[in-house]
Amino acid sequence: MTAPTRGQRKPVVLLRPVPGNSVVHQLWAGTKLLGVAIIGVLLTFYPGWVPIGFVALLALVIARLAHIPRGAVPTIPVWLWIVIALGALTATFAGGAPVIDVGSIEIGLGGLVNFLRLTALAFVLIGLGALVSWTTNVADIAPAVATLGRPLRVFRIPVDDWAVTIALALRAFPMLIDEFRTLYAARRLRPKERAETFRGRIRRLVSDLVDLLAAAVTVALRRADEMGDAITTRGGAGQISAAPSRPKSRDWVAFAILAVVCGTALALELTVLGTSLPRRGG
């Protein structure tokens, strides 16, 4: 029998869609990009608990509709939790309202509340980006960007070139990550000579780093050459963004739902709930 793998750490898997044919997968790529941009603008100007909560609830509903498995969510490393705990501890020293009494000592929790709010905001935005990555084919992003940037062509902005660049970067990113992981694993399997002095260990570390960077550059150039040959064989880079891409009826429904969620969150933040929740310390 094989050993249980419950404690095994799950790696970060992005830019690779989760198999499925849900309503979220069928949405236009431009709808998802615009939706994330609108939510980002909302949370930039109104980073309160109410908008964050509404967006987090929306993200959970989208994940449920898209049938995202729990295995797709990466494991948060322990060192990150330690960094967050240290950040929360140092933010507590900033003080501010609300204030609690611990015996004869008054402790202001304003800095801690602000830190937790910004941490929740970061997790929500990362989750939205992950949802777009898990439900969108990379090949659909370039035509969507070209369609969204069509009004900019009046100003002679090379929208198609930008779309092609974004598409190539998104395609190459996961491929290079796999190559770097393979190089790193192969490097760790090589026998190492133990240095006797501190200076020798530093020199060995620098030498290993230089070798690893040289191998990574070589692999990246080889992959770029292969990708260039493949693009030329398929008709050139212009074909990447030339595919027809436009919103459909389901996309307008998604925009309407997004408008209702953002509008409700903004209205509650500016009226009842926003004034009753803890605000910035000071």
Image (tube, helix red, strand yellow):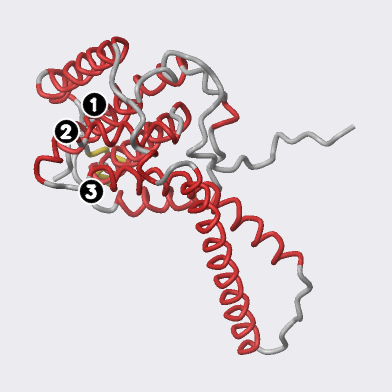
**Mark-to-mark CA distance, 3 and 1:** 24 Å
Marks 3, 2: nearer the viewer: 2
Marks 3, 1: nearer the viewer: 1
Please tell me whether residue 194 is drawn above or below residue 39 in the rendered image.
Answer: below
Q: N-terminal of the two: label 3 or label 1?
A: 1
Within 10 Å of disc 1 (Cα), the crowding (few <14, some 14-19, many 20+) is many
Q: Secondary structure at mark 2?
A: loop
Dot 1 amino acid type: Pro
Q: N-terminal of the two: label 2 or label 1?
A: 2
Identity of the residue drawn at 65% across and 61% down:
183
Residue 58: x %, y % from top left: 34, 20
Within 10 Å of disc 3 (Cα), the crowding (few <14, some 14-19, many 20+) is some
* Residue 37 figure quarter: top left
Residue 81: x %, y % from top left: 49, 46
Q: Which residue is mark 3?
A: 95
The residue lying toward the viewer, choosing from 125 and 53, is 125
Discs 2, 1 touching: Cβ within 8 Å: yes
**Mark-to-mark CA distance, 3 and 2:** 22 Å
Dot 3 amino acid type: Gly
Numbered mark located on residue 189 in the image = none
Quadrant placement of the C terminus: top left
Please tell me whether residue 227 is drawn above or below residue 26 in the rendered image.
Answer: below
Dot 2 amino acid type: Tyr
Residue 214: x %, y % from top left: 56, 73
The residue lying toward the viewer, choosing from 22 and 112, is 22
**Mark-to-mark CA distance, 2 and 1:** 7 Å
Numbered mark located on residue 51 in the image = 1
Within 10 Å of disc 2 (Cα), the crowding (few <14, some 14-19, many 20+) is some
Residue 45: x %, y % from top left: 15, 36
Q: Which residue is mark 2?
A: 46
Q: Secondary structure at mark 1?
A: helix
Identity of the residue drawn at 24% across and 17% down:
255
